[in-house]
Image: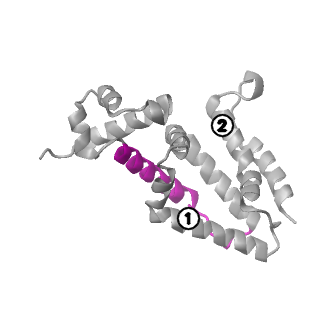
């Protein structure tokens, strides 16, 4: 049996992310990946059982990295405003540092593997529990209006992700050049807090 080569595995992961972002989930194949890595298709099967296994493993690794990043310096016992601002900062920092990984995860979220990826890691359930506790605490302290979860998420994070999408595209509406700044984030955040506080 051939031994795994860590550098080659990193190359495979980087190229898989690139190709899935570029061609989408349906346009991606192990043959394309092998060609991009300049290796044989057989070599890919040292690392992964098949295309689905590759996507799930890479997706789970990115999910774990994202959830760990998101709760850095964060506690569910923070005030709602302080905690949400840390969430914004962490999510923005991850997106700035790993734009391809974020783009990959957006593609994979629309694939049949999305639930498998999230359920494959205990990090997701830990993250979900931390965030549920944060929201529960904010409601208890009357720092947050009660909303359906999807409505809350749209208001709490929608403006941030819209700005991050503009930033990643390098342009906003009508093709106007755009670069996200701390001041813009703070301006949007103030509007969010105003909408969510009782």
Q: Is residue 12 above or below residue 85?
A: above
The single residue placed furthest to the bottom in the displayed view is 140
The color scheme shown is one colour
What is the quadrant of residue 137 in the picture? bottom right
Specify start and end residues of the magenta stretch as a single range: 52-79
In the shown orientation, is residue 159 left or right of residue 99? Answer: right
Q: Position of residue 20 (x, y in %)?
A: 45, 34
Q: Please tell me which residue is depicted at 48% across the width and 29% down the height of the picture.
A: 23
Q: Please tell me which residue is depicted at 82% across the width and 73% down the height of the picture.
A: 142
Q: Please tell me which residue is depicted at 38% across the width and 50% down the height of the picture.
A: 57
Numbered mark located on residue 165 in the image: 2
Q: Which residue is mark 1?
A: 127
Residue 75 among magenta residues = yes
The quarter of the rendered structure image containing the C terminus is bottom right
Numbered mark located on residue 55 in the image: none
Q: Main secondary structure of the magenta part?
A: helix
How many numbered marks appear?
A: 2
Closer to us: 166 or 132 = 132
Q: From where the camera sits, is residue 181 visible?
A: no
> Please, what secondary structure does the residue beneath circle 1 have?
helix
Q: Position of residue 127 (x, y in %)?
A: 55, 64
The single residue placed furthest to the left in the displayed view is 1
Closer to us: 125 or 143 = 125
Label 1 neighbour load within 10 Å: few <14, some 14-19, many 20+: some
What is the quadrant of residue 110 in the picture? top right
Residue 158 among magenta residues = no
| Pointer 2 or 1: first along the chain | 1
Mark 2 to mark 1 CA distance (whole Å): 23 Å
In the shown orientation, is residue 113 left or right of residue 169? Answer: left
């Amino acid at each position: 049996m051939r031994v795994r080569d860590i550098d080659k595995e990193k190359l495979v992961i980087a190229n898989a992310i690139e190709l899935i972002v570029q061609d989408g989930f349906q346009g991606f194949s192990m043959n394309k990946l092998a060609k991009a890595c300049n290796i044989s298709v057989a070599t890919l099967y040292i690392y992964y059982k098949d295309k689905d296994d590759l996507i799930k493993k890479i997706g789970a690794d990115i999910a774990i990295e994202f959830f760990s990043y998101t709760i850095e310096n964060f506690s569910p016992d923070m005030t709602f405003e302080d905690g949400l601002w840390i969430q914004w900062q962490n999510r923005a920092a991850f997106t700035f540092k790993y734009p391809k990984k974020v783009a990959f995860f957006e593609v994979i979220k629309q694939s049949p593997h999305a639930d498998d990826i999230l359920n494959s890691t205990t990090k997701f359930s830990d993250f979900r529990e931390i965030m549920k506790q944060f929201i529960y605490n904010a409601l208890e302290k009357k720092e947050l209006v009660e909303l359906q979860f999807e409505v809350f998420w749209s208001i709490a994070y929608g403006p941030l992700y819209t700005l991050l999408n503009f930033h990643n595209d390098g342009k906003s509406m009508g093709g106007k050049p755009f670069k996200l700044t701390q001041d813009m984030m703070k301006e949007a955040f103030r509007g969010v807090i105003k909408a969510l506080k009782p």
